[in-house]
Image: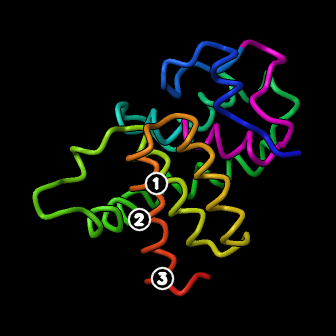
Amino acid sequence: MKFNLQDLLNQYGSQKSLDDFPEDKVRFTDDKRTEARLLAVQTVFTSLSEEKSTTGLINESLEYCGLKSAHLDKKLFAKIAEQALNNKENAVEEISLNLDESWTFARIDQVTAAILITAISELMTKENPVQVLVSEYMALAHAFLEEDNSKFIHGVLASVIKKYNLA
């Protein structure tokens, strides 16, 4: 079933923030894997502003949202989040290579950064079809970001895919 995350965010009063998950027993999608990726992005988002261990961030996210939701692939979430948090520096380097000379990574808004870090980290594992991952992360980008940021994310992902011959 195709989902429209933006419609769901509108329904629950989106503030363009990854902090506001719906109440218990309500989910954004009908797909456990998409829910896992969404929670992984939120975990990376949190890591950009809080100094905590990888295990601490993952456990906090599971306590906050994941344990409430039977409709979440918890193993996939933990795997994606751990990969993204442990490989954050490499992902930031890849993102930085795609910035204009006058920009630094610090100028990128944290939602964009969290989506990119998580997406790049999962792409580099080569465990899932590239098209599926790009589609999933672009859906998140369109749900939480303005069009320019979504285009930027798509461009960075395309660059990483080409550079590492992932397609």
Q: Marks 2 and 1, how far apart in space?
A: 8 Å
Secondary structure state at the residue bearing disc 1: helix
**Quarter-wise, where is residue 55 in the image?**
top right
Between discs 2 and 3, the one toward the N terminus: 2
Q: CA distance from mark 1 to mark 3?
A: 15 Å
Q: Is residue 35 magenta?
A: yes
Secondary element at image label 3: helix
Outermost residue toward the front? 147
Label of residue 162 in the image: 3
Q: Toward which corner of the image does residue 114 lie, by quadrant?
A: top left
The structure residue drawn at horizontal position 61% and vertical position 62%, both measured from the top left corner, is: 134
Residue 23, relative to residue 69: is it above or below? above
Q: Is residue 166 above or below residue 18?
A: below
Residue 61 position within the rendered picture, expressed as x and y whole percent measured from the top left: 62, 30
- Residue at (67, 14) in percent of width and height: 12
Residue 159 badge: none
Q: Amino acid at mark 2?
A: Val
Front one among 150 and 88:
150
Which residue matches tag 1? 116
What segment is highlighted magenta in the picture? Answer: 23-42
Query: Is residue 56 visible to us here?
Result: no
The residue type indicated by label 3 comes to Lys
Q: Amino acid at mark 1?
A: Leu
In percent of the image, x 48 and y 60: which residue is there? 154
For disc 2, the marked residue is: 156
The 10 Å Cα crowd at callout 3, few under 14, some 14 to 19, many 20 or more, is few
Q: Is residue 154 visible?
A: yes
CB atoms at circles 2 and 1 under 8 Å apart? yes
Tag 1: Cα neighbours inside 10 Å, few (<14), some, or many (≥20)?
Answer: many
